[in-house]
């Protein structure tokens, strides 16, 4: 009887060990599934936060693009109306824009860059490809261009072209 009891106990012990191993495997599987689900959730949180920031940035950009013409008109009005109240309003508006990260792109006297400005006119000048006049100011928000400027760009007078043209006219006899 003792042998059968020992045998039964051994079989029972084996069953318990097998059951224990099976449960350990299940626990490990559940743990892996939990960790994967947690990682997926954390990635979702990051993605949602990034999308939220992008939407906020896009909305701000659209808002500022809509109010920049108002600033343009304030600056035009300030030229004709010398009023301290108007200047104060414009300065407060500029300060508000600056606090929000919107700044004017300083281009006057600098080399033309098509990423920052649109050349709407050219004029003769001493140097080639310099911005000689800003017709509509450009603005950036952080490092991103919000609105490109419209500018007048200089082109150097081509003396060689003028000499060639004069020679051709002399050959033709066309003086006037």
Image (tube, rainbow, N blue to C red):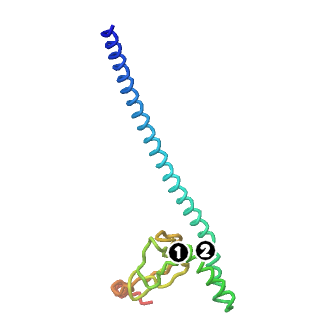
Residue 126, above or below 47: below
Residues marked 2 and 1 touching at CB (< 8 Å): yes
Q: Nearer the viewer, residue 103 or 107?
A: 103
Q: Nearer the viewer, residue 30 or 176?
A: 30
SS for callout 2: helix
Quarter placement of the C terminus = bottom left
**Location of residue 126 by image quarter:** bottom left
Name the residue rendered at 69%, 91% in the picture: 83
Q: Nearer the viewer, residue 115 or 167?
A: 115
**Location of residue 69 by image quarter:** bottom right
Q: Residue furthest front?
A: 2
Name the residue rendered at 49%, 70% in the picture: 145
Q: Sequence-wise, which precedes: disc 2 or disc 1?
A: 2
Image disc number at residue 35 = none
Q: Position of residue 127 (x, y in %)?
A: 38, 86
Q: Is residue 58 left or right of residue 14?
A: right
Name the residue rendered at 65%, 76% in the picture: 70
Q: Position of residue 101 (x, y in %)?
A: 53, 73
Image disc number at residue 139 = 1
**Location of residue 100 by image quarter:** bottom right
Q: Position of residue 1 (x, y in %)?
A: 33, 7
Badge 1 crowding class, 10 Å Cα cut-off, few under 14, some 14 to 19, many 20 or more, is: many
């Amino acid at each position: 009887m003792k042998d059968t009891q020992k045998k039964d106990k051994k079989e029972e012990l084996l069953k318990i060990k097998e059951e224990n191993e099976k449960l350990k495997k299940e626990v490990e599987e559940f743990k892996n599934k939990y960790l994967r689900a947690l990682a997926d959730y954390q990635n979702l949180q990051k993605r949602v936060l990034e999308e939220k920031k992008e939407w906020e940035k896009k909305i701000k950009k659209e808002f500022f693009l809509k109010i920049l013409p108002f600033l343009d008109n304030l600056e035009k009005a300030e030229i004709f109306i010398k009023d301290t109240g108007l200047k104060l309003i414009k300065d407060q508006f500029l300060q508000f824009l600056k606090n929000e990260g919107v700044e004017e792109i300083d281009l006057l006297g600098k080399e033309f860059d098509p990423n920052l400005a649109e050349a709407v006119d050219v004029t003769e000048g001493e140097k080639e490809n310099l911005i000689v006049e800003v017709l509509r100011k450009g603005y950036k928000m952080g490092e991103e261009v919000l609105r490109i400027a419209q500018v007048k760009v200089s082109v150097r007078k081509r003396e060689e072209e003028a000499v060639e043209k004069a020679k051709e006219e002399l050959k033709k006899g066309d003086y006037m």
